[in-house]
Image (tube, grey):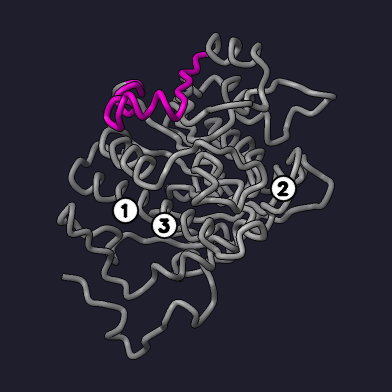
């Protein structure tokens, strides 16, 4: 059994040291990534239509993630009788993509360069936003130049459809990413879960989304279907990219976001879906977006985001250990 970090001579409590993701090693040289997971911050929020502040999401989620950094022998789950993220799962934090204020194109290009570097290294990219427009450069990075895995399906967990094509010339804001993703030839389809109530996308956007291969499931529909039912709607055997907007959760547990929408998911509803998907599919990339810490003085939203990401990574690598074909 792997030893605990406490045995190394330092207690190293969560509030001690530098706030990398999960207090994992920081790698400044993007050409020297040697890990199974690489975390990239994308602190860009110029794509927002209402309340900004997600630029501080990567910093907030990283700091919150230190809460779950006790020791290095993994996290034992007594319900599953499994130890998740043992020390042999190598995770590194490669810092943030450079953001150029008012320049969406250059900022997105810098994010894309970070994801490409991760893919070239053969690691799983985990991107922390930032607003949901950062998904656009993330998906672009999978165009085949640096990623050889072929087509994949996108699982979006979100309150909003984000399928606007163009509005007043804007094509790369946080209302556009799923439309831009659906246009890519290597994106085989989308499953959009949690979409509810008054949306930022008009009716024609829903029609276009379905015509371009999207399956749209509301929170109420997801509850009626059950976790396994939702997971089973994803194409069997497909590789999956997961994008999580924190506003998919009810603002009663995730108020720290720019566009909150009541009626959202609670923690275990999303966690159990992610576990099912990780057990059934090879996960090729992850982003989690729209955490805006300043709207939540309790810090609960950032903690929720960090906990979801760490649990998801735990599910992925536990599944890979027991089912090698999920590792690719």
* Residue ID at (48%, 31%): 194
The nearer-to-camera label among 1 and 3 is 3
The answer to which of marks 1 and 2 sits earlier in the sequence is 2
For the residue labelled by badge 3, is the local secondary structure a helix, a strand or a loop? helix
* Residue ID at (63%, 51%): 42
User: Which sits in the foreground, 159 or 6?
Assistant: 159
Label 1 packing within 10 angstroms: few (<14), some (14-19), many (20+): many
Residue farthest bottom in this picture:
9
Label 3 packing within 10 angstroms: few (<14), some (14-19), many (20+): many
Q: Is residue 215 magenta?
A: yes
- The alpha-carbon separation of the residues under discs 2 and 3 comes to 22 Å
Q: Quadrant of residue 295?
A: bottom right
User: Which sits in the foreground, 145 or 118?
Assistant: 118
In the picture shown, does residue 218 fall above or below 255? above
User: Which sits in the foreground, 92 or 179?
Assistant: 179
For the residue labelled by badge 1, is the local secondary structure a helix, a strand or a loop? helix
* Residue ID at (48%, 20%): 216
Q: Quadrant of residue 328?
A: top left
Q: Position of residue 279 (x, y in %)?
A: 26, 38
Q: Which mark is residue 314?
A: 1
The answer to which of marks 2 and 3 sits earlier in the sequence is 2
User: Which sits in the foreground, 145 or 318?
Assistant: 318
- Over which residues does the magenta segment extend? 213-235
Residue beneath disc 3: 307
Residue beneath disc 2: 45
């Amino acid at each position: 059994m792997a030893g605990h970090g406490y045995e190394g001579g330092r207690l190293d409590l969560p509030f001690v040291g530098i706030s990398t993701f999960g207090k994992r090693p920081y790698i400044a040289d993007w050409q020297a990534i040697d890990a199974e997971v690489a975390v990239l911050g994308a602190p860009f929020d110029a794509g927002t239509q209402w309340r900004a502040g997600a630029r501080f999401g990567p910093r907030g989620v990283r700091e919150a993630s230190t809460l779950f950094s006790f020791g290095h022998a993994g996290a034992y789950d007594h319900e599953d009788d499994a130890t998740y993220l043992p020390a042999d799962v190598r995770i590194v934090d490669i810092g943030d993509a450079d953001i150029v204020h008012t320049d969406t194109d250059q900022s997105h290009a810098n994010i894309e360069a970070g994801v490409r570097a991760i893919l070239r290294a053969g690691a799983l990219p985990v991107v922390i936003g930032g607003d949901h427009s950062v998904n656009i450069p993330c998906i672009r990075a999978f165009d085949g130049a640096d990623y050889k895995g072929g087509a994949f399906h996108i699982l979006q967990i979100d309150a909003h459809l984000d399928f606007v094509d163009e509005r007043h010339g804007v094509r790369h804001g946080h209302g556009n990413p799923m439309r831009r993703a659906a246009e890519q030839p290597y994106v085989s389809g989308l499953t959009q879960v949690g979409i509810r109530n008054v949306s930022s996308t008009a009716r024609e956007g829903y029609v276009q989304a379905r015509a371009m291969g999207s399956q749209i499931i509301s929170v109420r529909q997801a509850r009626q279907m059950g976790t396994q039912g939702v997971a089973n709607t994803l194409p069997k055997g497909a590789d999956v990219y997961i994008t999580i907007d924190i506003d998919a959760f009810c603002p009663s547990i995730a108020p720290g976001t720019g566009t909150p929408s009541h009626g959202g998911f609670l923690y275990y509803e999303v966690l159990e879906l992610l576990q099912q998907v990780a057990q059934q599919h090879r996960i090729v990339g992850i982003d989690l977006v729209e955490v805006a810490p300043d709207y939540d003085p309790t810090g609960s939203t950032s903690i929720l985001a960090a906990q979801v990401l760490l649990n998801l990574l735990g599910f992925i690598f536990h599944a890979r250990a027991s089912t090698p074909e999920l590792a690719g």
